[in-house]
Image: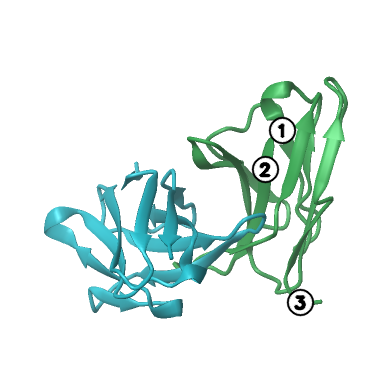
Chain colours: A cyan, B green
Amino acid sequence: AQSVTQLGSHVSVSEGALVLLRCNYSSSVPPYLFWYVQYPNQGLQLLLKYTTGATLVKGINGFEAEFKKSETSFHLTKPSAHMSDAAEYFCASSGGYQKVTFGTGTKLQVIP
Amino acid sequence: DAGITQSPRYKITETGRQVTLMCHQTWSHSYMFWYRQDLGHGLRLIYYSAAADITDKGEVPDGYVVSRSKTENFPLTLESATRSQTSVYFCASSESGPVGYTFGSGTRLTVV
């Protein structure tokens, strides 16, 4: 069974500072991993995904994430936060099947 | 318009009433999903469908019914609404494989 743990339900960063959102997964098989972003009153939008190959994946809006099998982690980073990055971010995993398990989300606040 | 459309966007219903949430996608994606989003729980899978006339239960299916007679439509019915079903409901679709989901904008359902 898949499970995803997001550390920190709320994260605050200053505008221009590094964004780091943490995600750890539990999987009995090599996982597929995803990050989604949700803006207020909207659906989720895919930011990036890891399937196979290169462990550092780049997504939209300057975000990237690194798959670290030894740490069972898939943390999301962005070098410099922008006000428009304020949103809720969800990590998700699937074990090769179409069903995806989502984490409980991390709300990112960007302080001007 | 291309995309995935949910209707209605907002719905208030009374306890015990039947209510149907609609989901329509224009991409002919094979897979469709219904999730509910609740504070502290993230997204939880209610039902999913791999193709027309093929549906299966997710994590929290009790009290819900789905059908999929056409590839593009995946309605979710609450047979007898309860207050615990007050939530935001998201429909999603995807192609086969780990490509990620495309989400609708959600239906905010309040059961009074």
> Marks 1 and 3: CB-CB under 8 Å?
no
Q: Quadrant of residue B87?
A: top right
Of the numbered discs 1 and 3, the one sitting upstream in the chain is 3
Q: Looking at the image, is mark 1 or mark 3 nearer the viewer? A: 3
User: Does dot 1 land on a helix, a strand or a loop?
Assistant: strand
User: Does dot 3 land on a helix, a strand or a loop?
Assistant: loop
> Marks 2 and 3: CB-CB under 8 Å?
no
Residue of label 3: B2
Chain for numbered disc 3: B
Q: Residues within 10 Å of mark 1 (few under 14, many from 20)?
A: some
Q: Residues within 10 Å of mark 2 (few under 14, many from 20)?
A: many
The quarter in which the C terminus of chain A is drawn is bottom left
> Marks 2 and 1: CB-CB under 8 Å?
no
Residue A19 location, x and y as percent?
32, 65
Chain for numbered disc 2: B
- The type of residue carrying mark 3 is Ala
User: Which one is in front, B107 or A54?
Assistant: B107
Query: Which residue is pictured at 77% across the width and 33% down the height?
Result: B110
Of the numbered discs 2 and 3, the one sitting upstream in the chain is 3
Residue B75 showing in the rendered view: yes
User: Which one is in front, B12 or B59?
Assistant: B12
Of the numbered discs 2 and 1, the one sitting upstream in the chain is 1
Q: Quadrant of residue B4?
A: bottom right
- The type of residue carrying mark 2 is Val
Distance between the alpha carbons at the discs numbered 1 and 3:
27 Å
Query: Which residue is pictured at 14% across the width and 54% down the height?
Result: A71
Residue of label 1: B64
Residue of label 2: B88
Residue B31 location, x and y as percent?
61, 60
Query: Which residue is pictured at 37% across the width and 74% down the height?
Result: A63
A1 vs B84: above or below: below
